[in-house]
């Protein structure tokens, strides 16, 4: 590890801290304010969307209505994406004349983008037409991110709204949240940063692949395409689906250390900002900062471990020279903290412990800033759990923001917690003992098991990064991963929204000295403890057979 | 008193019964009530089956026989220990309750049927039966006096030796079975069918049969079941995952890992904690009608406290003598004493005491003086005595002034001013006169109980607001509220105002606790989240509340809250401890499981346990023993300190969180050393 | 329910048009207007004006008179710009260890005058397989071979290498590096093309 490496990490984090409050405050205005910002510029776009979409923006929804809207919209999105892939050979903007995408791959990809996972069983440059990249994939980058933000907002409203005399029944309107997220947050920022990326060398064209003759006289075919417009939203929406197979390691996606910094910042910006938005909704900014602090601590723990492991091993395999070890370890931590899944280095080639970090980051539930929206609602589930266990220790039945946490919330929270190990461990166990599972592996020995674990953890956690050696483009892998992604997204969202619905109506008791404070250092530490212990206890046995064993075996000099 | 009934934590007879019950509770139907222990039970059955298989047909592939046997035995112990914890708690509760109801089972009752008396065993009395009880007899069941008045010795229930008066009508009509009538004759209408009295219900609650899980207990159970399922997934999937690396894990090892990981400590002790909470209340002579009420007590945000008896000693006491100008203090003291010597009211007696203590005037006998006592009447609003020609009077200031003026006396202006000052401070002025002369004023004050201020300060620290309820006027109420240190008061309280206050607080989401004894308290007692009825109160009040205080001591409410908090804290602390334990268990078991295939992972065996088998066995043994070791804590409850939430939490986290991580490392290592020492491994 | 399905379908179309078509088209228009050269691949030309590749995309070099790039797993032969990929081999991979051993032996053999061990990055495949850069150490390590093949003094080549070293951006970001293609173009410019 070098001082400069740490300086890069600190500079990055300082920027994250710097954008958290302004962006969070801006989003609060967008979603909760009476008047949205930039009314002249963006107001007409918002209203046009409502008009064209047939949305009554004054009508709020119950949690059930909100959930139904989300599910129907997501289902429609998956369907459209599937159809576009299957028909891309007859649709325009396909200069390379790429053929229709194979059905299970198309299904996997449609689910992958619909769930904000952006797992890539395909290699972009050799599979997807420009139209598919734009209209099917980049579109989903917007909508799945906006939907995630919507769920987070709905949950935040459920926790923070104070019921009137007849009790509050509604927690916002999905269509309004979706529209505002796109129009006021995702679209303007994407446009600006797409141009910044282009200025550094990221492609943005519709040209056919360009053939050049190299200095040594060989032919090299350069892939082209509208990359920057997708790149910006891919990071900003924590989607992570690269235009190219190598994702953000590809020089056309991430040409310089500066773009690398920008991309990492875009990944953390909204999840970090939402903690501030949440604090404002809770009428206590410290509630947001307490969560932010817990996330930050986990982030630093991860990046320190990853950077140490990679630097210790002088490991450049799978890393780009322009980024070096520090920025690669940092990117790997950021992208897996935040459910993004973009990669600027190949995690599969990390040292065992270096690769353990991204895997653990995802396994903790994508709550270290987490996905856009998903991070906040995920961490709020852990907050509920923390409050429940800790609340008892102060001699009161647990309450959060003055609302009691009771049987129903616990049931739903446990459902949320259970889905994760059930899918990840269940599918991993299956894949690790059947030939059609193991045959896709690129590495032998414990590292092969790590590839399996990483794949399902990434899929269920809706991250999308991979130990990329695994050939997931088989019927078994495409299908099981699609199932993992669907469960990991919607079977976790539904309990979350249900919790929001049941918390909504609870009376709020103003906090006193006897209530357990959820806005201080102690709570942050507790939250950290619960996240780590729940995650570690769940996955330690499996992980110990993968990266942990591999670490010791590697020390022993054994190869597979 | 309550403390007299302490049963030692490990009373031998309770222990003996509990050991037997531990086996009885192995019945699958009973075990299934506790999913965590049910999983352990299933695991035990599984390893037992494996053990039998191994006994029948040995195979070198299987784990050594001694290992499978040892694990099996200790898994069964784990279940038995948990059952034992519950049985001990039940046993203690039962013993407590049984000692209370023992006497009444043996008594016979004189039942009135159509004016005729007949003798029936007390246990056959039904609700609505009317029975006659005379001096020297035991009251056969809980009920209400409908005829007559009697003094009753309730020491069997309350430990208080002074007899109390019970009479028909009004707020002192309620009697408890097992108490003894000392004088007179009363007719009692029985209030409950056999088996339905408060005590019976309490006994049922501490016994398994009718015990229902409380809301928070259910929520905690959900958490524990969830964690159990998580670990079930983690352990079951470990088999194929290990198979990938060509490690064949035996079922014994997997079951051992699973049992060590699932929260058996809290799972095994949870119901014991709940029962012990009720039992602790019972030891304080409070009968809870449901576990839910005990839990709610911990959550109370607002305490409504009746001024009289709770905050003040209950009677106004003379605290000061203020002579008017021209009268010596001695003269005033002398007359005040004479006016009060025959006055048997607490106020009167307090004047005599004050004069005796402050002015060294011994009590005199009115008869010896030839004085004639003039008792208090509502008409004159004065009392006193006639000593020859001297008419000595004490009474309400206005009444005495009128009396003096009637006798042509002068009324000094100072008297009214002094009286106002005293009233403004929340006390009551009594004027004293001798003939046509006003001598001065006696200040009667509500004396706030000593130590009550600190008590309220503690509640404030816990975030509980105290509200004093009093019939006094606001001025008086405010003065007393200030002196006692309550947060708020409700003056000139009517039952309706009280009810409104409760509803207002509840509307704000707060939980309200109160005490009450009168029939007109009943609606408020029912409305409150925790309503503690005094045993001396009316049947209606007792029916409406969800707790009954046998001592009829309103201050008890404070202890009830503490018991509730302690109950919740014990649950939280043991849950934290239980989960924190898992870290060490992982470090014991996982290296042991994989060491065979990957010798390189030896550094993970941070405890340097002797062998894989001893590592696993040590973890299993620790896991079982910790249940036994924590039984006293579960029964006694964690130590409660009236501190702010943040402070409490920091403490508990340090002890049960950090302690929970560290303890098993030490424990497992010790057990491993023991196993090696005895040559078991 | 029915109306919410209708709204869902309408919103699907509306958002798709806005974010899937309008947004990338507008971005492309602006990019082409503002950063045309960058948006189209940062292509570079040799002394004669022929496009010889992209500044950002690495190429395979095998001739001794050129600086060599890092190993590549993009495509069968490496540096296939339509098949970006890393090796995805882990620490305990025998394949990786064999590859590194073989490359190390080959590089030592082909760089007889090189000082010290082979720099790390020359033995490690990049993440994209298209890494245009090598470390300054890796460039310097190759100087003796390139100088001998071109028949020029090592110092002169070293001067070119020093000029080609790109420091950390803003002095902080990333690692120092040398763009292999640019360096080789500069070599050809300075000392003449060998072909």
Image (tube, grey):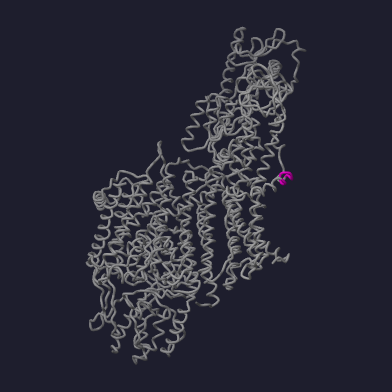
Task: Give the residue at the far right of this rendering.
Answer: B368
On the image, the x and y values in percent for residue C120 come to 44, 79
**Camera-side residue: A462 or B133?**
B133
Specify the farthest residue to the bottom: C151
- Locate residue B456, reporting x and y percent: 59, 37
Q: Is residue B560 at least partly visible in the picture?
A: yes
Is residue B570 visible in the rendered structure shown here? no
Q: In the depicted view, which residue is nearer to us: A385 or B646?
A: A385
Return the x and y of residue A205 as percentages of the image width and height.
25, 68
Q: Which residues are magenta?
A: B11-16
Report the quarter where the C terminus of chain B lies. bottom right
Residue at 34%, 92% in the rendered image? C151
Left or right? Give the position of B251 relative to A89.
right
Rendered position, B241 above or below B288? below
Which quadrant of the view contains residue B93?
top right
B298 or B13, nearer to the observer: B13
For the stretch drawn in magenta, what is the main secondary structure? helix
The one of B18 and A133 positioned closer to us in this rendering: B18
Compared with B262, B474 (above or below) is above
Position above or below: B113 against A344: above
Image point 49% across, 52% down: which residue?
A414
Q: Residue furthest front?
A: B56
Total numbered badges shown on the rendered structure: 0
Residue B384 lies in quadrant: top right
The reply to whether the magenta stretch includes residue C43 is: no
| Image quadrant in which the N terminus of chain B is located | top right
Q: Picture coordinates of residue A232 (x, y %)?
A: 32, 63
Q: Quadrant of residue A240?
A: bottom left
């Amino acid at each position: 590890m070098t001082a400069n490496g740490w300086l890069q990490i600190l500079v990055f984090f300082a920027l994250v801290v710097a954008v958290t409050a302004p962006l969070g405050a801006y989003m609060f205005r967008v979603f909760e304010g009476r008047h949205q910002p930039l009314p002249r510029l963006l107001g007409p776009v918002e209203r046009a969307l409502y008009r064209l979409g047939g949305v009554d923006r004054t009508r709020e929804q119950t949690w059930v209505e909100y959930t139904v809207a989300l599910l129907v919209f997501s289902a429609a999105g998956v369907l459209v994406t599937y159809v576009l892939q299957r028909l891309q050979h007859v649709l325009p903007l396909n200069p390379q004349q790429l053929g229709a995408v194979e059905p299970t791959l198309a299904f996997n990809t449609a689910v992958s983008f619909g769930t904000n996972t952006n797992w890539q069983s395909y290699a972009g440059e050799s599979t997807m037409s420009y139209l598919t990249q734009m209209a099917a994939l980049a579109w989903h980058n917007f909508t799945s991110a906006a939907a995630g933000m919507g769920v987070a907002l709905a949950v935040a409203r459920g926790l923070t709204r104070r019921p009137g005399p007849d009790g509050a029944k509604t927690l916002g309107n999905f269509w309004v949240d979706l529209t505002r997220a796109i129009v006021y947050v995702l679209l303007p920022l994407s446009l600006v940063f797409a141009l910044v990326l282009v200025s550094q060398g990221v492609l943005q064209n519709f040209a056919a692949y360009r053939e050049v003759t190299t200095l040594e006289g060989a032919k090299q075919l350069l892939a082209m395409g509208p990359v920057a417009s997708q790149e910006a939203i891919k990071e900003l929406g924590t989607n992570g689906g690269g235009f190219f197979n190598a994702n953000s390691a590809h020089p056309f996606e991430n040409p310089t250390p500066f773009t690398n910094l920008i991309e990492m910042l875009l990944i953390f910006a909204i999840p970090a900002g939402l903690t501030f938005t949440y604090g404002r909704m809770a009428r206590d900014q410290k509630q947001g900062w307490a969560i932010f602090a817990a996330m930050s601590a986990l982030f630093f723990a991860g990046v320190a471990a990853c950077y140490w492991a990679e630097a210790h091993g002088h490991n450049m395999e799978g890393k780009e020279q322009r980024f070096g070890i520090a920025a690669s370890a940092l990117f790997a931590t950021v992208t897996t903290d935040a459910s993004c899944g973009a990669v600027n280095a190949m995690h599969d080639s990390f040292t065992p412990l270096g690769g353990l970090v991204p895997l653990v980051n995802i396994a903790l539930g994508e709550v270290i800033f987490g996905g856009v929206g998903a991070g906040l609602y995920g961490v709020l589930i852990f907050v509920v759990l923390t409050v429940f266990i800790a609340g008892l220790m102060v001699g009161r039945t647990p309450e959060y923001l003055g609302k009691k946490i009771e049987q129903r919330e616990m049931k739903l929270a446990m459902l949320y917690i259970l889905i994760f190990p059930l899918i990840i461990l269940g599918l991993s166990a299956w894949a690790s003992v059947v030939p059609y599972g193991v045959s896709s592996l690129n590495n032998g020995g414990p590292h092969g098991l790590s590839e399996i674990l990483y794949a399902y953890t990434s899929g269920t956690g809706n991250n999308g990064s991979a130990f990329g050696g695994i050939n997931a483009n088989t019927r078994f892998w495409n299908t099981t991963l699609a199932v993992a992604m669907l469960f990991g997204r919607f079977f976790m969202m539904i309990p979350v929204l249900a919790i929001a619905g049941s918390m909504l109506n609870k009376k709020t008791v103003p906090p006193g000295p006897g209530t357990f404070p959820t806005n201080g250092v102690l709570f942050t530490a507790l939250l950290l403890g619960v996240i780590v212990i729940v995650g570690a206890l769940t996955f330690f046995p499996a992980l110990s057979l993968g990266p942990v064993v591999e670490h010791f075996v590697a020390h022993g000099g054994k190869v597979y | 008193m309550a403390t007299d009934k302490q049963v030692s934590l490990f009373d031998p007879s309770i222990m003996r019964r509990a050991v037997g019950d531990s086996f009885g509770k192995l019945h699958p139907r009973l075990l299934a009530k506790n999913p965590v222990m049910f999983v352990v039970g299933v695991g035990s059955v599984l390893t037992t089956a494996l053990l039998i298989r191994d006994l029948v047909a040995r195979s070198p592939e299987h784990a050594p026989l001694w290992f499978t046997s040892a694990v099996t035995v200790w898994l069964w112990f784990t279940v038995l220990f948990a059952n034992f914890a519950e049985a001990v708690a039940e046993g203690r509760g039962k013993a407590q309750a049984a000692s209370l109801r023992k006497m009444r089972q043996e008594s016979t009752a004189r039942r009135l049927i159509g004016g005729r008396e007949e003798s029936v065993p007390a246990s056959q009395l039904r609700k609505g039966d009317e029975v006659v009880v005379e001096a020297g007899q035991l009251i056969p069941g809980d009920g209400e006096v409908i005829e007559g008045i009697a003094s009753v010795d309730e020491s069997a229930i309350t430990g208080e030796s002074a007899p109390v008066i019970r009479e028909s009508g009004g707020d002192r009509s309620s009697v408890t079975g097992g108490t003894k009538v000392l004088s007179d004759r009363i007719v009692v209408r029985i209030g409950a069918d056999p088996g339905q009295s408060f005590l019976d219900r309490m006994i049922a609650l501490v016994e398994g049969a009718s015990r229902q899980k409380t809301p928070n207990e259910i929520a905690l159970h959900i958490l524990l079941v969830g964690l159990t399922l998580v670990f079930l997934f983690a352990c079951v999937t470990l088999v194929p995952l290990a198979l990938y690396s060509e490690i064949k894990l035996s079922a014994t090892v997997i079951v051992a890992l699973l049992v060590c990981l699932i929260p058996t400590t809290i799972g095994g002790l949870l119901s014991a904690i709940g029962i012990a909470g009720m039992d602790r209340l019972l030891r304080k002579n409070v009968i809870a009608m449901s576990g839910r009420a005990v839990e709610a007590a911990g959550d109370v945000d607002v305490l409504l406290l009746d001024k009289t008896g709770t905050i003040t000693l209950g009677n106004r006491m003379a605290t000061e003598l203020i002579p008017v100008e021209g009268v010596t203090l001695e003269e005033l003291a002398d007359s005040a004493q004479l006016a009060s010597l025959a006055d048997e009211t607490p106020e009167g007696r307090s004047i005599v005491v004050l004069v005796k203590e402050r002015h060294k005037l011994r009590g005199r006998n009115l008869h010896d003086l030839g004085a004639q006592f003039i008792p208090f009447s509502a008409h004159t609003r004065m009392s006193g005595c006639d000593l020859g020609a001297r008419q000595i009077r004490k009474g309400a200031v206005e009444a005495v002034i009128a009396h003096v003026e009637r006798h042509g006396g002068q009324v000094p202006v100072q008297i009214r001013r002094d009286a106002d000052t005293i009233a403004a401070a929340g006390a009551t002025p009594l004027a004293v006169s001798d003939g046509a002369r006003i001598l001065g004023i006696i200040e009667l004050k509500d004396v706030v109980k000593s130590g009550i201020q600190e008590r309220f300060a503690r509640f404030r620290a816990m975030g509980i607001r105290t509200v004093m309820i009093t019939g006094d006027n606001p001025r008086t109420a405010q003065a007393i509220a200030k002196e006692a240190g309550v947060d708020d008061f409700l003056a000139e309280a009517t039952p309706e105002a009280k009810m409104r206050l409760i509803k207002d607080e509840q509307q704000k989401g707060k939980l309200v606790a109160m005490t009450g004894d009168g029939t007109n308290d009943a609606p408020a007692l029912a409305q409150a989240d925790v309503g503690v009825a005094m045993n001396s109160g009316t049947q209606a009040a007792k029916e409406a509340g969800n707790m009954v205080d046998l001592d009829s001591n309103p201050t008890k409410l404070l202890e009830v809250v503490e018991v509730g908090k302690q109950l919740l804290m014990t649950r939280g602390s043991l849950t934290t401890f239980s989960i924190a334990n898992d870290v060490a268990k992982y470090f014991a078991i996982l290296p042991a499981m994989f060491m065979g295939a990957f010798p390189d992972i030896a550094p993970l065996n941070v405890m340097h346990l002797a062998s894989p088998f001893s590592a696993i066995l040590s973890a299993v043994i620790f896991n079982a023993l910790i249940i036994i070791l924590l039984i006293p804590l579960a029964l006694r409850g964690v130590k409660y300190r009236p501190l702010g939430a943040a402070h409490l939490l920091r403490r508990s986290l340090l002890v049960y969180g950090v302690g929970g991580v560290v303890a098993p490392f030490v424990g497992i290592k010790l057990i491993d050393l023991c196993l090696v020492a005895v040559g078991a491994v | 329910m029915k109306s919410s399905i209708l709204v869902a379908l309408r919103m699907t179309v509306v958002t798709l048009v806005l974010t899937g078509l309008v947004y990338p088209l507008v971005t492309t228009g602006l990019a082409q207007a503002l950063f045309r050269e960058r948006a189209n691949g940062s292509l570079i030309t040799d002394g004669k004006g022929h496009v010889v590749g992209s500044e950002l995309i690495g190429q395979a070099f095998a001739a001794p008179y050129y600086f060599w790039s890092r190993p590549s797993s993009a495509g069968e032969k490496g540096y296939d710009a339509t098949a970006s990929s890393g090796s995805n081999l882990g620490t305990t991979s025998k394949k990786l260890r064999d590859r590194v051993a073989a490359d190390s032996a080959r590089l030592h053999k082909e760089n007889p005058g090189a000082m010290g061990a082979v720099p790390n990055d020359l033995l490690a495949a990049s993440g994209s397989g298209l890494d245009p850069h090598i470390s300054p150490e890796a460039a310097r390590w190759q100087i003796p071979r390139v100088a001998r093949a071109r028949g020029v003094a090592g110092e002169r080549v070293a001067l070119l290498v020093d000029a080609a070293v790109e420091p950390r951006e803003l002095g902080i970001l990333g690692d120092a590096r040398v763009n292999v293609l640019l360096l080789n173009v500069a070599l050809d410019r300075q000392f003449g093309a060998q072909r």
